[in-house]
Image (tube, rainbow, N blue to C red):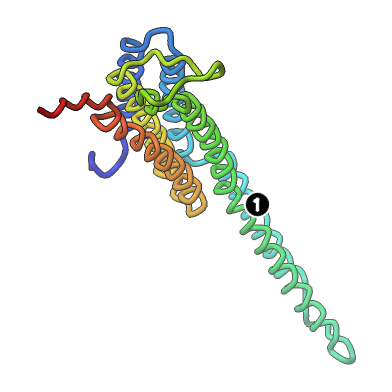
Amino acid sequence: MPYRTLDPDKIIATSDQLAARIGERFPDSGLANVAIELRALALDTKEKAARLEQPIWWLRALIAIVTICGTMVFVFIGTFLSFDRIGPDGFDFVQGVEAAINTLVLAGLGYVTLFKAEERIKRQHVLTGLHSLRSLIHVIDMHQLTKDPVVFNPEVKPTASSPKRVLSKGDLSRYLDYCSEMLAVTGKLAALYAQAVPDTEVAEAVNDVEMLGSNLSRKIWQKIMLIGPSMATKPARRPRK
């Protein structure tokens, strides 16, 4: 079903178009470079998610070999080891059964550990990919950090250490909106990992990344809402007649 799964190609196309839009409106800006990096990360995420969807065949072959070898060992023990030689007190048979039970328990635990190794390996790859997305989210937040609409208030005077404010209201609004769109794209890239690896811990890690981007985007939209008539210079009152 095309509308029940995320299409990585469409996400890449969105990030590509977003990078073009930012580059056209703010050429040679730091945000344009971040948008290019976002597109590169989208391509990388697509490749990683595609690999994670595939089974780790060498590990599954190793599990099959271990399973066959373990079965052969138990068959050998059950075929050639005789338990009819019971001592005077019958302790030999009891000790043999106890050793067999201990062996079965240890073998079972080892098999379960080996069987879950594929899940752990994929989870580690997902966490590594999410770390890159989380870092990019913070980079985007740093670029919008000094874009404060309060500068349009005539009562606010810049200081010697204040950053240069060269954007108009319209450009600042577009700048912040681009930052919000980039954060949304990072959330969709994180969701690709959850789609490729249906794991509870992976889903929680992806939700954390999406929540981080959503919280920062909410702050950005608060700034966008401030860029409006309320921030404009109030018209002078007409003198009363």
Judging depth in this view, the residue of 55 and 71 nearest the camera is 55
Relative to 83, does residue 135 appear above or below in the rendering?
Answer: above
User: Label 1 belongs to which residue?
Assistant: 66
Residue 69 % position (x, y): 67, 54
Judging depth in this view, the residue of 39 and 213 nearest the camera is 213
Q: Quadrant of the C terminus?
A: top left
Asked if residue 60 lies left or right of residue 222, the reply is right
Residue in the picture at 39% in, 26% down: 155
Asked if residue 231 lies left or right of residue 208, the reply is left
Q: Quadrant of residue 8?
A: top left
Give the residue at the far top of this rendering. Answer: 28
Q: Quadrant of residue 186?
A: top left
Residue 14 % position (x, y): 30, 25
Q: Residues within 10 Å of mark 1 (few under 14, many from 20)?
A: some
Asked if residue 204 lies left or right of residue 105, the reply is left
Give the residue at the far right of this rendering. Answer: 88
Give the residue at the far bottom of this rendering. Answer: 89
Number of labels in the image equals: 1
Q: Quadrant of the N terminus?
A: top left
Judging depth in this view, the residue of 105 and 172 nearest the camera is 172
Residue 143 % position (x, y): 47, 23
Residue in the picture at 65% in, 64% down: 108
Give the residue at the far left of this rendering. Answer: 241
Residue 12 % position (x, y): 35, 25
Q: Secondary structure at mark 1?
A: helix
Tell me the kind of residue under disc 1.
Val
Residue in the picture at 44% in, 47% down: 207
Relative to 235, does residue 203 appear above or below in the rendering?
Answer: below
Relative to 233, does residue 79 appear above or below in the rendering?
Answer: below
Judging depth in this view, the residue of 40 and 148 nearest the camera is 148
Residue in the picture at 46% in, 44% down: 206
